[in-house]
Amino acid sequence: MEEFFGTPDEPRLPDGTGLNLKLIETAAGPVAGNADGTEQGLFRQHCAACHGITGDGAGAMATTFDPYPRDFRRGTFKYTTTRADAKPLRSDLRRTLLRGIPGTGMPSFAELPPEQLDALVEYVIYLSLRGETEQYLVQLVVDEGEYLPLGVDAKEMVLEDAVLWVAEQWAVVEQNPQEYVVPVPPRPVCGSDAERAASIARGKELYASKDAQCAQCHGPTGAGDGEDERIYDDWNKPKKGVTPEQTAKLARLYTLPLQRLRARDFRDGAFHGGSSPEDLYRRIHIGIKGTPMPAAGPQPGAKGVFTPEDIWDVVNYILSLSGEK
Ligand code: HEC
Ligand code: HEC
């Protein structure tokens, strides 16, 4: 790990990842000011208290948040413009830094200069790439009982199968946005109150339909009180045993206790991935990665439960509930 990625003070990268080491270096290391007025150590200054120095989401303040600060090591990000099976764009991570994640502990960093945001985005990708590589190695050793011979061949294998493979997942999205970014068709204009009411009524029906299963998690009236209460995100699922005893035993293996995930109460009006109609369209089409919230729109090779027109009706329905509280 150290040979590929260096240390938190002196990050390093093998050739061919496509990441910008200069930017990463600005975000890394201890907090300091440079002679030319630029700043160092941005991640430790602004993020590590929550996300942890290695990006494992277990910083000193982590237990006070629900959901926990994101563990970047899975390489999964919730709020993206890219389809369900793809990495985010840099601009997706940047948007999250600019507006934060309303309704969670993730604050907005809109006051930081653009070059610092670029450095932090690059550093998140670096930590994520490092984390996915670490998990790959752990899996080899623990799950498959495979001891790594510390030879040149093993290093080549890890480089090819983990580091560069993951880096490629990030690169392809950036290089072919037309293939990976989910298009948002223009929102149909409702010319009159009657038209708007009709769209909301259609949305309500689609929402309640058996195929879509929205109500199963979000409840019949969208109050987040569906019957499916035992839901967990991908970060917490491994901590959940079948029996309470198993769960207690698993707890000893993790830094943070098991945390349940709640389906959104639409009446709150605080949508985590943004509250514009377009943001909600994306959320319903793409789903929320790393959570049981499914993708309802058409995906490559799958029709999806909703057409784009359906999704706009459902967006109108959800917006009609928003702010009810
Ligand atoms: C006060 C705690 C806190 C601080 C400080 C903080 N975060 Fe977060 N961050 C969170 C929480 C909590 C979440 C998870 C929200 C969720 O899962 O819905 C999160 C999520 C994220 C995500 C995931 C976005 C997605 O689409 O899944 C990124 C990226 C991120 N933070 C980056 C940063 C960076 C970079 C910094 C420093 C500039 C930072 N955060 C500072 C609490 C924090
Ligand atoms: C298996 C459970 C499940 C189903 C089925 C489900 N959701 Fe969700 N939904 C969730 C969870 C959990 C969250 C919150 C995830 C988080 O905060 O990480 C969520 C969040 C949302 C949000 C909030 C997005 C935001 O930015 O805050 C919307 C809107 C939404 N769901 C709409 C729908 C619609 C429409 C359907 C039906 C097509 C649906 N959901 C089906 C579990 C579900």
Image (tube, grey):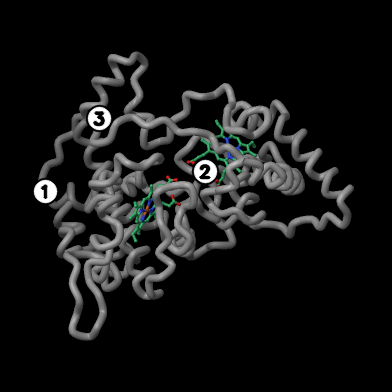
- Quadrant for the C terminus in the image: top right
Residue 265: where, in percent of width, then height? 58, 37
Of marks 2 and 1, which one's residue comes earlier in the chain? Answer: 1
Question: Disc 1 designates what residue?
Answer: 151
- Residue at point 29%, 17% (across, down): 246
Is residue 97 left or right of 317 when viewed as pictured?
left
In this view, the residue farthest toward the front is 325
Question: Disc 2 designates what residue?
Answer: 288
Looking at the picture, does residue 217 appear above or below residue 202?
above
Residue 284, numbered label: none
- Residue at point 48%, 43% (across, down): 289
Q: Badge 3, how many Cα within 10 Å: few under 14, some, many 20+?
A: few
Of marks 3 and 1, which one's residue comes earlier in the chain? Answer: 3
Is residue 269 left or right of 10 when viewed as pictured?
right
Three-letter code for the amino acid on which mark 3 is drawn: Asp
Residue 111: where, in percent of width, then height? 41, 70
State whether label 2 is within 8 Å of ligand 2.
Answer: yes
Q: Quadrant of residue 318?
A: top right
Is residue 320 left or right of 256 when viewed as pictured?
right
Question: Disc 3 designates what residue?
Answer: 143
